[in-house]
Amino acid sequence: MVANALDSDLRIRARVLQIMAALERAGATPISNRDLHSVAYLANVLSPIWDVEPLETSVLKDREGPRSIAFEHEIDLCIGQGLLVVASLRPDPENPTRLDATYRLNARVARPILDSITLLPDEQSVEHFLNELAFALAEIQPEARDDAALQDASWSNPAVAEGRIVDFGQHSQRAAVNPSYNAAQAFQRFAPEGMKFNRAEKLLMYMRLLKRRAHG
């Protein structure tokens, strides 16, 4: 049990670094804590497009947006270990009783770890997926990035009330219970005859849909 928990923690910590590295490549850092949680949520809920295993398959539908306690814990550890740098600290504009930090990757410290992660089975595919997601997110205005997650099909599903669990399914059940995956797949129905969208195109189109909704 302890070993499994440790493995889970290390996987989440690795994903924090992978997401931050992708955001750095996309020029989307420093990134706020709120936005980083939104990116992590989108990475989980959109992972089946890339056949990537999500780190979490459910999240509490909080009024302030998606937030993972486990992910937050690993962010804190990455800061303590010098893997992430706090670029700024200010009152949260949506909750003045709380501080909101922005982060950037400490590449000098994190790069050897990221290089080792990339050598693991399937992690190059994860890196490719996160790069595509980060570059699509970079098209969204910084002040609207957390709103984009709120427009996601799974999060905005009216059948899931605030304070309930947004469940986007275990691996074998995703197509049945993941509205985000289904929405991204639906773009194929509108493609010209003979054209087949690849997974990167589906992800980009879905993210651009969230962008339009977030930008109003």
Image (spheres, rainbow, N blue to C red):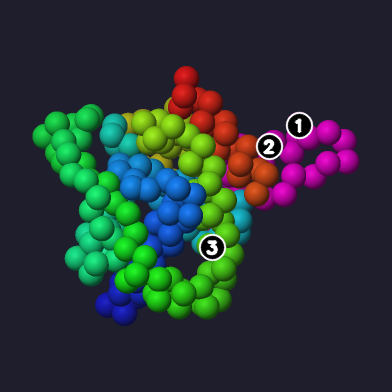
Residue 126: numbered disc:
3
* Badge 2 amino acid: Ala
Please state which of the two labelled residues, at mark 3 or mark 2, is closer to the viewer: 3
Q: Which residues are magenta?
A: 170-199
Please state which of the two labelled residues, at mark 1 or mark 3, is closer to the viewer: 3
**Residue farthest to the left, as pictured:** 97
Q: Do the residues bearing badges 2 and 1 touch, measured as CB atoms within 8 Å?
A: yes
Q: Residues within 10 Å of mark 3 (few under 14, many from 20)?
A: many
Quarter of image, res 189 = top right
Quarter of image, res 155 = top left
* Badge 3 amino acid: Val
Mark 2: secondary structure: helix
Mark 1, residue position: 190
Mark 1: secondary structure: helix
Q: Do the residues bearing badges 1 and 3 touch, measured as CB atoms within 8 Å?
A: no
In three-dimensional space, the C-alpha distance between marks 2 and 1, rounded to whole angstroms, equals 8 Å
Q: Do the residues bearing badges 3 and 2 touch, measured as CB atoms within 8 Å?
A: no
Residue 186: numbered disc:
2
Q: Residues within 10 Å of mark 1 (few under 14, many from 20)?
A: few
Dominant secondary-structure state across the stretch colored magenta: helix
Residue at the spot 59% in from the left edge and 64% down from the top edge? 125
The number of numbered discs placed on residues in the rendered structure image is 3
In three-dimensional space, the C-alpha distance between marks 1 and 3, rounded to whole angstroms, equals 28 Å
Residue at the spot 19% in from the left edge and 65% down from the top edge? 80
Can residue 173 be seen? no
Q: Is residue 144 above or below residue 6?
A: above
Residue 176 belongs to magenta span = yes
Q: Is residue 138 above or below residue 85?
A: above
